Image (tube, rainbow, N blue to C red):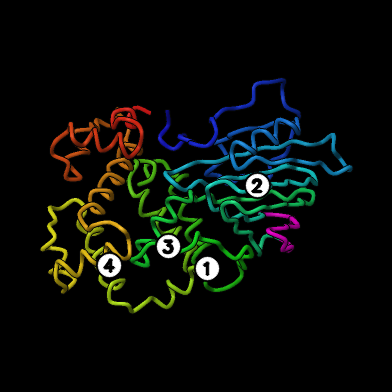
Amino acid sequence: MPRLARLGFIDHHRTDGPVRRRVRSRGVPPALAGREIFYTEDPRQAADLLGRALSPASLTLGDVDANRFAASLHGVRLRDVSLLHLDLGIAATLDIPAMGPYFAVHMPTNGRALCTHEGRTFEANPVRAVVTSPGMSLTMRFAYDSPQLVLRIEQEALVRHLTRMIGGSLSHPIFFDPELDLTTDAAMRWTGAIQLVHTEVFYEGSLVQRGQGIGSLEELLMSTLLLLQPSNHHAQLVLPSEQTGRRVVREALDYIEAHLADKVTMADIARNVHMSIRAVQQGFHEELGTTPMLYLRDRRLERARADLTDGLPSDGMTVTEVAERWGFHHLGGFAVLYRKRWGESPSETLRR
């Protein structure tokens, strides 16, 4: 299986059926052109497939040109970030009662879509995107010829990333303002990050194509969205808390992140944040509900899983190599911890 064809939310396939009628190219980005997830001229099948790729939804066609309906979805998934291109062709309404456990940025590349998100109605177009949050409702009324690029970020990954950024657990689920103005100077960073994804996915031999740098690229996208788009946690990012406990935790998290592959002790962490071991432990207990060493172990398990997910057995990668890289020198113990955390063995992840 190609490394970047591992779509976790829908099987990667081409529709089996009669020869398609000729449909002109509708601006599928070059990086996604060969990565079709589905194509169908059946509205019911389109609703079902979109429900599996995004969230359960209903699809209603407009009266004009309904016989010309042709839906397609192209996409690629890295680890916790997916880049998708959705095209319904004609005027249609997509109604999602509750978004799944992911955040998404819907960016029309042409035309427009009238959006209703939790009772708030506005237009999405090439200069105004829609940002959705888990559990929220979304209705998009697409005009004719209104394809869109969708960036999907899994909820668990964004929550973990924001927790590290602010140095504390989240008191409330993340909820973004749904309107994203793409014309601002700040939004140029977002556009640049999306272009970087395109480049890394498109070019053979890129870091991402070789299974490297995926985590850094995803963190860039998550950080950019969190810092750019208003949310109920935005103030914690732009005006960090100066509470001693949270500051200590934030600095300790930075140190741990920079030394995940090294031998790290509590004394190392305390020395580098200029606090006592007890103060660091208390900060982690109050802000994260865990201990520094348990947090370190969990982050190493996450990095090990990332390496096993990105790697292919044909690369010569082994479970033992990955375990030792991240400080797990007892393979049996690593396998037990890994299965308890992820529900499968390390070798199953590598083979998948």
Amino acid type, callout 4 = Val
Image location (x, y in percent) of residue 124: 70, 60
Image location (x, y in percent) of residue 42: 75, 30
Residue to which mark 1 is pinned: 232
Element under disc 4: helix
Is residue 126 highlighted in magenta?
A: no
Neighbour tally class for label 2: few under 14, some 14-19, many 20 plus, Cα within 10 Å: few
Residue to which mark 2 is pinned: 27
Nearest the eye: 31 or 185: 185
Magenta residues span 109-123
Q: CA distance from mark 3 to mark 1?
A: 10 Å
Q: CA distance from mark 3 to mark 2?
A: 39 Å
The N terminus - image quarter = top left
Element under disc 2: loop
The disc at residue 170 is 3
Nearest the eye: 22 or 49: 49
Q: CA distance from mark 4 to mark 2?
A: 46 Å
Element under disc 1: loop
Q: Nearer the viewer, mark 4 or mark 2?
A: 4
Residue to which mark 4 is pinned: 249
Identify which residue is drawn at 14% across, 36% down: 330
Amino acid type, callout 1 = Asn
